[in-house]
Amino acid sequence: MIEKTRVLFLCTGNSARSQMAEGLLRDLAGDQFEVFSAGTIASFVRPQAIAVMNEIDIDISAHRSKSADEFLDDEFDCVITVCDHANQRCPVFSGPAKRLHWSIDDPVLSGSEQEQLASFRRACDELHQRIRKFIQETNA
């Protein structure tokens, strides 16, 4: 049996960027990775994140927001923070976890529904590009 690479995406509230990253990596890499997401605090999965992911046929509607505390005893091959706040407050995980930081702009903003969705799409697009590169580098 081939061991999967265990990846944790970490953000502040585990409501948007880390949730989208989890869904994207799972979709793009299939069974190659075991993927999780969490926040420095748990909150809720934003409906805009669910909507934007649905636009690219990835369903994250069943995801729930989780605190990083749920994973402190787990081992990961890679922990990727996707916001500066989480990068500064990232807990130490047991095991050989490689730490990466991707500073993705917070898609949450005030404005019309269309402006909000556009912001979430930009974050999703940037995550998509970074995750494709991450997959290539991991497979190199």
Image (spheres, rainbow, N blue to C red):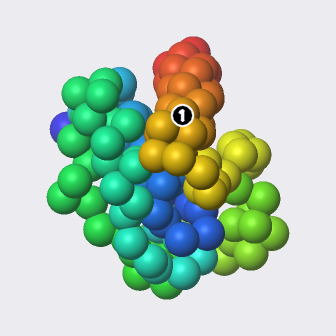
Q: Quick check: 50 left or right of 108? A: left
What residue sits 54% from the left and 26% below the top? 125
What residue sits 30% from the left and 28% below the top? 55
Compared to 19, does 5 lie above or below?
A: above
Badge 1 crowding class, 10 Å Cα cut-off, few under 14, some 14 to 19, many 20 or more, is: some
Q: Position of residue 128 (x, y in %)?
A: 51, 27
Q: Quick check: 43 left or right of 56? A: right
Residue 51 or residue 58, whichever sits in front: 51
Position of the C terminus, as image quadrant, is: top right
Residue that numbered label 1 is attached to? 118
Count how many numbered circles sit on residues in the image. 1
Position of the N terminus, as image quadrant, is: top left
What residue sits 32% from the left and 48% below the top? 50
Q: Position of residue 139 (x, y in %)?
A: 50, 20
Q: Quadrant of residue 4?
A: top left
Compared to 129, does 73 lie above or below?
A: below
- For this orientation, the residue located farthest to the front is 112
Q: Position of residue 116 (x, y in %)?
A: 53, 45
Compared to 92, does 28 lie above or below?
A: above
Q: Amino acid at mark 1?
A: Ala
What residue sits 62% from the left and 57% below the top? 110
Q: Is residue 131 visible?
A: no
Q: Quadrant of residue 3?
A: top left
Q: Position of residue 17 (x, y in %)?
A: 53, 50
Secondary structure state at the residue bearing disc 1 = helix
Q: Quick check: 135 left or right of 89? A: left
Residue 111 or residue 52, whichever sits in front: 111
Q: Is residue 113 visible?
A: yes
Residue 47 or residue 44, whichever sits in front: 47
